[in-house]
Image (spheres, grey):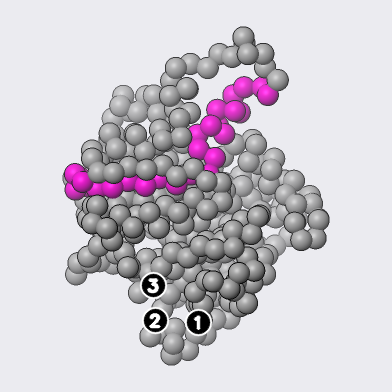
């Protein structure tokens, strides 16, 4: 089944909200090149806006990881016209690659003696992987089913598939689904020493590290005021297997730059926006938000895919695939369409 997107909220290095993401796409629709890109600092997010939405006293024990998720969830609710409250039985699915533990590891040396560990109870409770889901449930008063998916590469397509399954099974009429990962020293160092599994090349690549959160409110049935495209399909598989659905006349947003995306024997027109929000395990959630904006505004679509001409078939069924392939060959794709 296809799911209706009632609202969306994003937080990243470009700022907060879909309007800031759209502004970033208009200014820099294609990645820059040159040595300065390789040396680019990480894309980190600011969450100051959250203090205007929720009393700071309520947030005094919340860390940066959870603040990004809470802020993106609030922005999604406001964008959907549900700022006064989500339906009580709303489901919640949170996808993360590294969870909050990566940030905690930055605070402690790897060779510290067990007796010297000085982690406070607050740090410990915030290090639990479902901490963000717990904060969102409490602050947005979400009482439906809740699930945190912790998977380094495929967490986002798994989360969207779970949300669609809940809607299709009738477990709930509304699902708040999103992704969250925060910057860490370990993530940054890993990006500087990434290795191409096919060629064996290693070393610095022009892939800036980032962090951020993207949340979406999905429903079974649309309304007249729906302003966004639908989530049409979620596909997952392994490279080299021909069991996936074909994607003719579908441009692709891929999660890593300079990849010659060979998908089920096809090499579709593709683009990437890692130059806008960086790369991190769940940055595919940002790709979904970007795809929604491209399909809503034809000018953005032509700016991002200047060589693409899908012809009558695309104009009859306009859609964009958000694609990510893992290092072990697993791949996932979320198809957004009007």
In the figure, is residue 338 to the left or right of 280? left
Q: Can you identify the residue that label 2 sits on?
A: 317
Q: Image quadrant for the C terminus?
A: bottom left
Q: Can you identify the residue that label 1 sits on?
A: 249
Few, some or many C-alpha atoms within 10 Å of disc 2 (few <14, some 14-19, many ≥20)?
A: few
Q: Position of residue 217 (x, y in %)?
A: 30, 54
Few, some or many C-alpha atoms within 10 Å of disc 3 (few <14, some 14-19, many ≥20)?
A: many
If you read the primary sequence from the N terminus, does the residue marked by circle 1 or circle 3 appear first? 1
Q: Position of residue 216 (x, y in %)?
A: 35, 54
Q: Is residue 71 visible?
A: no
Residue shown at 61%/78% (left/top)? 266
Q: Residue furthest top?
A: 115
Foreground residue, 74 or 234? Answer: 234
If you read the primary sequence from the N terminus, does the residue marked by circle 2 or circle 1 appear first? 1
Few, some or many C-alpha atoms within 10 Å of disc 1 (few <14, some 14-19, many ≥20)?
A: many
| Residue 108, magenta (yes or no) | yes
Q: CA distance from mark 3 to mark 2?
A: 7 Å
Q: Position of residue 5 (x, y in %)?
A: 31, 62
Q: Which residues are magenta?
A: 85-110
Q: CA distance from mark 2 to mark 1?
A: 9 Å
Residue shown at 54%/81% (left/top)? 308
Tags 2 and 1 touching, CB below 8 Å: yes
* Secondary-structure class at tag 1: loop
Q: Can you identify the residue that label 3 sits on?
A: 337
Tags 3 and 2 touching, CB below 8 Å: yes
- The mark total stands at 3
């Amino acid at each position: 089944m296809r799911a209706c997107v009632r609202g969306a909220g994003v937080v990243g290095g470009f700022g907060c909200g879909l309007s800031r993401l759209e502004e970033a796409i208009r200014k820099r629709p294609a990645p820059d090149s040159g040595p300065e890109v390789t040396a680019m600092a990480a894309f980190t997010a600011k969450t100051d806006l959250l203090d205007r939405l929720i009393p700071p006293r309520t947030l005094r024990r919340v860390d940066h990881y959870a603040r990004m998720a809470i802020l993106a969830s609030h922005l999604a609710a406001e964008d959907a016209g549900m700022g006064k409250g989500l339906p009580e039985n709303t489901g919640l699915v949170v996808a993360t690659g590294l969870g909050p533990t990566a940030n905690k590891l930055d605070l402690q040396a790897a060779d510290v003696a067990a007796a010297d560990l000085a982690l406070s109870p607050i740090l410990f409770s915030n290090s639990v992987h479902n901490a963000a889901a717990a904060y969102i449930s409490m602050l947005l008063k979400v009482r439906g089913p809740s699930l945190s998916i912790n998977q380094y590469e495929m967490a986002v397509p798994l989360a969207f598939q779970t949300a669609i399954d809940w809607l299709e099974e009738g477990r709930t009429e509304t699902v708040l689904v999103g992704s969250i990962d925060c910057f860490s020293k370990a993530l940054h160092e890993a990006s500087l020493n990434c290795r191409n599994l096919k060629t064996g090349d290693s070393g610095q690549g022009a892939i800036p590290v980032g962090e951020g959160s993207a949340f979406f409110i999905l429903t079974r049935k649309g309304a007249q005021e729906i302003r966004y495209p639908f989530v049409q399909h979620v596909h997952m598989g392994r490279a080299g297997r021909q069991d996936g659905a074909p994607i003719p006349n579908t441009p692709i947003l891929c999660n890593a730059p300079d990849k010659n995306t060979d998908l089920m024997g096809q090499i579709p027109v593709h683009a990437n926006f890692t130059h806008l929000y960086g790369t991190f395990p769940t940055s595919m959630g940002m790709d979904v938000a970007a795809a929604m904006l491209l399909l809503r505004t034809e000018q953005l679509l032509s700016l991002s895919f200047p060589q693409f001409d899908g012809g009558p078939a695309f104009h009859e069924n306009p859609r964009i695939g958000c694609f990510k392939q893992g290092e072990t060959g697993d791949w996932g794709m979320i198809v957004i369409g009007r």
